[in-house]
Amino acid sequence: MRRTKAEAEETRNSILSAAERVFFEKGVANASLDDVAKAAGVTRGAIYWHFSNKTDLFLELYNTVTLPLEDMIVRDTEQPAGEVLSVIEKSAGDWLEGLAADEHRQRIFTILLRCPYGDDLLPVLEKQQEVDDRHTVMLDNAFAKAKSEGFLNGNWTAQSATKALRWMMEGLCSEWLLFGRRFDLAAEGKDGLRRLFGSFQPVPESVSAAAVS
Amino acid sequence: MRRTKAEAEETRNSILSAAERVFFEKGVANASLDDVAKAAGVTRGAIYWHFSNKTDLFLELYNTVTLPLEDMIVRDTEQPAGEVLSVIEKSAGDWLEGLAADEHRQRIFTILLRCPYGDDLLPVLEKQQEVDDRHTVMLDNAFAKAKSEGFLNGNWTAQSATKALRWMMEGLCSEWLLFGRRFDLAAEGKDGLRRLFGSFQPVPESVSAAAVS
DNA sequence: GTTTTAACATACGTATCTGTTTGTATAATT
DNA sequence: AATTATACAAACAGATACGTATGTTAAAAC
């Protein structure tokens, strides 16, 4: 019965993987540890050996992934201001493509969205807010740089552009994940991004004339 | 022990009201019927008298409210095309104000967002999708009318405008409701709407010149 | 080679939640 | 006034699900 350290690590991982699938399918609250154990091909004994309880299992699962927005970094804020906007747009588009291609992240994101945050897993909410806040600050700075160099038209401030982008991304992903992925996330998302960033640009007179024509 | 019909209806309503608060605080899955009963000042007997089980209670609660988007109607699509955009914008802004002022709707919306939709309450999901779809069609038609009359600039199609608006509203409300209402929903929402609808407008040359200056 | 200990499986006790059943006081009915 | 049906409360029975305690086997440690 006693396994090697490598085997133990394997079962631990299989438990985490099973928990991800079960939590995704039944919801964290409705899933029992026995459900997870059966999905992992072990008994609850194994789960209680590796984790102290369901909350702990959830927290550990949560720690295995990079948060939804954590890697959506504006890679290089030291870039020429003229390219800042296109870099952000590309970064957001890439992130959508990554999500669309990675079922693992889709499940984690969905679990987090539908999670009934009780007092027990307050740390999860706090970490999420912290990541969100960092991301907001980063975007604010990048847009401010673009604004100061004249690449953001009079309609938009740095803060309002940040919020518009974040709200659009959040709404887009929520609808896609929670409502059955009924459209092409990457394609429609990038299309939306293109239009949003198009509305950021100052309008040269020639383009304006063309649009009116 | 036997109450009058009016009293019975009163307890029924108090049960629904208590369910709303308890479901909001603990999540639908984590809340027991005894929690609801205690919050309502009755026993589970009363709940089982008025409702057949927790799912039924949830469905009845769900039916007491107009859905989040159900009343966000473009009131008059027969209006002059020039005013369609401003009517939609005002309608969305009013809806945000209504949500910000109505804690009842906030709780219902939050419950629906965080709800781990099992197979049992599939009808809820279906009705929500139906409402969403109707709303999308209405917006599509309205934007199409505006577009055909030249009130939507070349960057936007009717469909893309609809999606941009819906995503923004959804992201906005999700962040506000799920992350502790950390900003002024009506004020910031209307601000975002103003900028979004500003980007819809065709740019007259005079304005364009002013923006560049 | 023996002992120890890690990595589980199994078994147990318990709390909780659910659904039903029974009891009961009173409003409504006749 | 007697009866009946209503609107619950209280008690009961069954099923989970949880946490723990104990058993078991094989890998390490010595």
Image: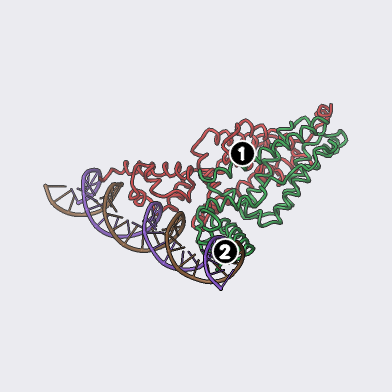
Chain colours: A green, B red, C purple, D brown
What chain letter is assigned to the residue under label 2? Answer: A
Q: Residue at x 40, y 49 (%)?
A: B33
- Horizontal and vertical percent position of residue A14: 61, 62
Between residues D15 and B73, which one lies in front from this camera angle? D15
Q: Nearer the viewer, mark 2 or mark 1?
A: 2
Between residues A89 and A122, which one lies in front from this camera angle? A122
Between residues A108 and A186, which one lies in front from this camera angle? A108
Location of residue A160 (image quadrant): top right
Badge 1 local density, few (<14 within 10 Å), some, or many (20+)? few
Circle 1 sits on which residue?
A: B76
> Which label number is shown at residue A40?
2
Give the residue type at disc 2: Ala
- Horizontal and vertical percent position of residue B47: 36, 49
- Horizontal and vertical percent position of residue A60: 59, 52
- Horizontal and vertical percent position of residue B54: 43, 52
Give the residue type at disc 1: Asp
Location of residue B147 (image quadrant): top right
